[in-house]
Amino acid sequence: MHKHILGALCALSAGIAQAETDLLAPVVVTATRNATPLEHIPASVTVIDQETIAEAQANDIGELLRGVAGIDLGRNGGPGQTTSVFLRGTESDHTLVLIDGVTINPGTLGNPALQNIDPRMIERIEIVRGPLSSLYGSSAIGGVINIITRTDPEQGSGSHFAAQGGNYNSLSLNTGAHWADQSSNLALNLSHQTSDGFPSKRDSSVDRGFRNDTLNARFGHRSGNHELQLQAFAATGNSEYLSGTPVDQAFENRVLRAGLTSQLSEAWQSRLTFSQMADLIDQNQANYLGDYDYAHTIRYSADWQHDYRLSANNRLVAGVTLDHEDIDALSYGTAFDIRLDNQAFYLQDQYLNGAHTANAAMRLTRHDSFGDHLTWNLGYAYQLSEATRLRASAGTAFRAPSASDLFGYGANPALEPEQSHSIEIGLSHRLDQRSSLDLAIYRNRVRNLITTNYYDLDGIDNGYPFGSLIDDPLNENVARATISGVELAYHYALAPWQFDANAEWKQPKNDADGGWLLRRARVSGKASLRYIQPSWDAGLDVQFVGKRADISAITYLDTTTDAYTLVNSTARWYASRQLTVEGRIENLFDADYELASGYNTPGRSLYLGIRVESAR
């Protein structure tokens, strides 16, 4: 049945009468650390814009990322449960995640708390696939995801309110106000989310809920050639889950940022940014040793970036970054408390001349524990014709072992940093004024990949929750992993219809034993169809994800997670210029599927909501 639905969508998009709709390329920041038109970037970039976010009516960032080309998603249950992103087949801690340019990956396990970010606070998401350690440092092996929070009009004032409710006693409330004149602007956004959830594991009948309160505040002031920006983002709440017995934990994710942008001359711009990031988790129940586990990361950063136009065709970006990290944790009797001071210098040259675009970047990172690391990126694009663009890129990246890798569960202070070398070639082709095609072929080789192995070192049951004598964990560097893949994306727009589809084929292999890397599908794809009218719109998404290797959360044995097809639908009615009524059906055909083996996912679910906006 699902195959027939997908075929019908494709046939419908191809049979629509012809009209002309321009395909406008957006401007992105993440790929080059400055505003650059997408068509001038020799890398694979996806932008999830504000309209796409509003249309999706998603409850968390994971739902927005699911189905994006190159992304595999793992989630340990329902709302608020740990969510992992595998970008282009790399590990979940190989993707650097930013909020407004500030890194939020914690210094403990390295996985950012995507499940705690309310999409209603987001303006857009920029996803750059491929290594970017040359611009951002450690962890950007698979790529970078930059979550850019909501901005408001540069002039005038207004307010908004949104409410959504649905299955599992889920409720989302969002409100905010903004004001701006020619020199200053001020905005405040607040959100509240609660859900009773459902049993996170398949062998349980105990619902696990979630509560999240989020604040995002901005202030800006422009005086002459200088502009000051202040921002505070904070998400706090409680997440319930299962760890043998029902437990819960309190969390706080915080980003504080102060920036000063100065136009020092017509060709020279300076951007000085100070930030603090906090990722705080505190367990509310004692573990079997009687301890209350916790994991805390607080990072202070200073970044001074200079953009200089050498000529009309050549722009130079140079900067320095200083980081200080305070990391402390306690887990199952293992504790650590460390301080890290890291420094980096980065340099990038962007060249644009007619049909030719070239980028070259390098970064020297001085890591407190692992010394100097030099990483680089090279990219070139050629506009073969008005409709066709070729691109190629290569780069290196690294990830320093986290504090948890070195001193936590499976501690191994002798670990070496993971390192990668990646190449990519791509083709973008505009078929006509209504449709376009994008193709990317890539290969990424990762050395010193860190995995956790288990041994019976002393024949004694050490009490770890795996129920086995073979329970002495050890984090180790394996020889190498090779990930090769092909991504294909298609876009068609002809009012009132819009159709998007993507497909990916990849081979994420551990070269040490020939096995498949966990939770990464070899075949996946998504098709989305939207019908847009002045007073209403509707959308239908069909996603297919192939089989994946995994470890069962129930038996702790190697297993294979079955392929699945997921269908979601949305609709919106614009009752007036200020009032929108919206609805979403998740898992329309009530598919039984897993994002991680042994963990439940939502059944058919209905969500209804309203949005009210006023502005003058």
Image: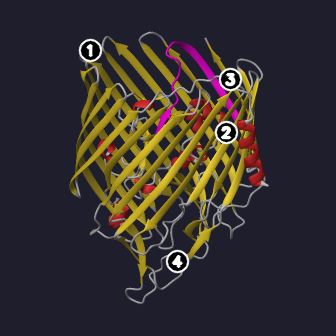
Three-letter amino acid code of the residue under disc 4: Phe
Q: Marks 2/4: CA distance?
A: 37 Å
**Can you identify the residue that label 3 sits on?**
19
- C-beta proximity under 8 Å, tags 1 and 2: no
Three-letter amino acid code of the residue under disc 3: Ala
Please identify the quarter of the rendering in which residue 476 is found.
bottom left
4 or 1: mark nearer the eye: 1
**Can you identify the residue that label 4 sits on?**
466
Please identify the quarter of the rendering in which residue 221 is found.
top left
Q: Secondary structure at mark 2?
A: strand
Q: Dividing the image into 4 quarters, which one contains the C terminus? A: top right
Dominant secondary structure (helix, strand or loop) of the stretch shown in magenta: strand
- C-beta proximity under 8 Å, tags 2 and 4: no
Is 376 above or below relative to 590? above
Q: Marks 3/4: CA distance?
A: 61 Å
Query: Which dot marks residue 162?
Result: none
Residue appearing at x 46%, y 17% in the figure: 185
Magenta-tinted stretch? 144-163
Q: Earlier in the sequence, mark 2 or mark 4?
A: 2
Residue 434 part of the magenta-drawn span: no
Q: Percent from the top left, x then y, of residue 549?
A: 55, 68
**Can you identify the residue that label 2 sits on?**
172
Residue appearing at x 42%, y 33% in the figure: 384
Three-letter amino acid code of the residue under disc 2: Ser
Number of residues whose C-alpha sits closer than 10 Å to that of mark 1, classed few (under 14), some (14–19) or many (20 or more) = few
Q: Secondary structure at mark 4?
A: loop
Q: Marks 4/1: CA distance?
A: 63 Å
Q: Secondary structure at mark 1?
A: loop
Q: Earlier in the sequence, mark 3 or mark 1?
A: 3
Position of residue 542 in the picture relative to residue 486 (left or right): right
Three-letter amino acid code of the residue under disc 1: Glu
1 or 2: mark nearer the eye: 1
